[in-house]
Amino acid sequence: MKLKDITLKNVKAYLQAHYRIAIQESLPEHIKEQVVWRASKAEACTANGKCLYCGCSTEDLELYYADLGCKKPDEPCYPNMMTKEEWDEYKQVNKIQA
């Protein structure tokens, strides 16, 4: 990570991800499902232990717990975290089994 990447938005995402990890047993099901789905969509980054684009750690899946979607501009692996309603519709439209 470069100094220019330390922004309020990224710090918020980092804190949010670690908070969600700390309370993961009580997270809503639609958040848990999206974390697992995001890790599978970014399979190469997950296997690498860090994002191949931005360099953020994926070792404990923390990158996938934040609301921010994949930052890769040309072909992001996954969108921003969705609400329950958005996620249910997205799963239906894209035929995702969760």
Image (cartoon, rainbow, N blue to C red):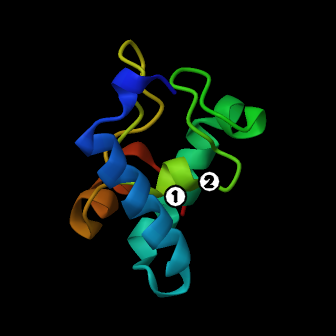
Q: Is residue 53 above or below residue 96?
A: above
Q: Residue furthest top?
A: 74
At x 44%, y 71%, the residue is: 19
Among the 4 quarters of the image, the one containing residue 29: bottom left
- 41 horizontally vs 50: left or right: left
| Residue 58: x %, y % from top left | 64, 44
Disc 2: which residue? 61
Amino acid type assigned to the residue bearing label 1 in the image: Val
Assess disc 2: are there few (<14), some (14-19) or many (≥20) residues with their C-alpha within 10 Å of its C-alpha. Answer: some
Amino acid type assigned to the residue bearing label 2 in the image: Leu
| Residue 30: x %, y % from top left | 40, 70
Of helix, strand and loop, which one carries label 2? loop
Checking the image for residue 3, the label placed there is none
At x 35%, y 16%, the residue is: 73
At x 58%, y 28%, the residue is: 55
Labels 1 & 2 near each other (Cβ < 8 A)? yes
| Residue 87: x %, y % from top left | 32, 59
Q: Is residue 42 above or below residue 38?
A: above
Checking the image for residue 35, the label placed there is 1
Q: Quadrant of the C terminus?
A: bottom right
Q: Rounded to the nearest whole Å, what is the CA distance between mark 1 and mark 2? A: 8 Å
